[in-house]
Amino acid sequence: MIPTEPNTDPIRVFIVDDQAMIRAAFKSLLARTQGFEVVGDCGDPLAAVAAARAASPDVILLDITMPGLSGIDLVPRLRAVLPRVHVVMLTHHEGESFVDQALRAGAEGYLSKDSDPAELVLALESVHKGRMFLSPKVAAGMLQRARTGAQPVGGTRLESLTPREREVFQLLALGKSNKEVAHALSITLGTAKKHRENLQRKLDCHSAAEMAILAIQEGLLEA
């Protein structure tokens, strides 16, 4: 069993990841770790808000790269219904742009899926106590940037998009039609078409294939 600090009440954890095996692995790990209770999990980011609200966790482990809605875009939705919840992002992406986006969205922890299990325990305990947690690789990169005064490398083409446009973008990148986008987001067909036109203009992407390539480059979809 992985040791952790004694705690009268276990830290209640909810897991959001579209890969069932990943969720199962984290649930198994935390089940063997004193001081934690997994109160639920969800593989659908669009359904995760209601599921997490019902479970009322202390901490949410949230994947970044998911179809339909990225973890970064999901954070504000979760905080709207669970204002006191703490969020730890789970990702394979350790670049500064992703860290900056996650922290600006309201995440308090940023953890690589390749991290040692002990780091997961430390991340959960840290954010539960109101402290930030960054995986060592990420922290080292940010410290180096602070020492040199360098700005974040590059940036992201998606920074100019509104939250709704980001949602539409991800669905279009998955190859969804305007009608399917409208149904998924409960908007009119005309609104979906207008969002597509705005995205094509803002991103200079004029096909679903181009949007898919950009989504992969931005880390929102797996290659």
Image (cartoon, rainbow, N blue to C red):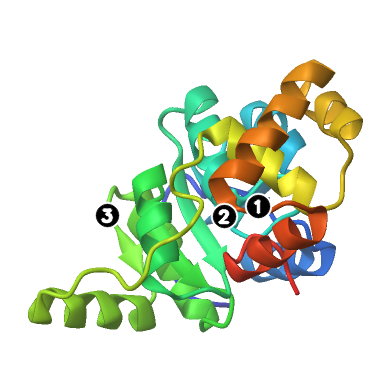
Are dots 3 and 1 in contact, CB under 8 Å? no
Note whether residue 217 is visible.
yes
Asked whether, in this view, residue 9 is left or right of residue 44, the answer is left
Q: Amino acid at mark 3?
A: Arg
- For residue 61, which numbered disc appears in the image? 2
> Is 70 positioned to the left or the right of 210 in the image?
left
Residue drawn 77% across and 44% down?
171
Q: Which residue is mark 3?
A: 131
Residue density around tag 3, few if under 14, some if 14–19, many if 20 or more, within 10 Å = few
User: Could you give the CA–CA distance between mark 2 and mark 1, rounded to whole angstroms?
Assistant: 5 Å
| N-terminal label among 3 and 1 | 1
Q: CA distance from mark 2 to mark 3?
A: 15 Å
Give the total of numbered labels.
Answer: 3
Upstream in sequence: badge 2 or badge 3? 2
98 lies above or below 181: below
Give the image location of residue 80, x and y in percent: 49, 24
Which element is circle 2 on? strand
Instruction: Name the residue that disc number 1 marks.
Output: 15
C-beta proximity under 8 Å, tags 2 and 1: yes
Q: Looking at the rendering, in which quadrant would you find the C terminus?
A: bottom right
Judged from the image, the secondary structure of the residue bearing numbered disc 1 is strand
Q: Amino acid at mark 1?
A: Ile
Q: Nearer the viewer, residue 100 or 109?
A: 100
- In the visual, does 163 lie left or right of 175? left
**Residue 15, percent from left and from top:** 65, 52
Q: CA distance from mark 3 to mark 1?
A: 20 Å
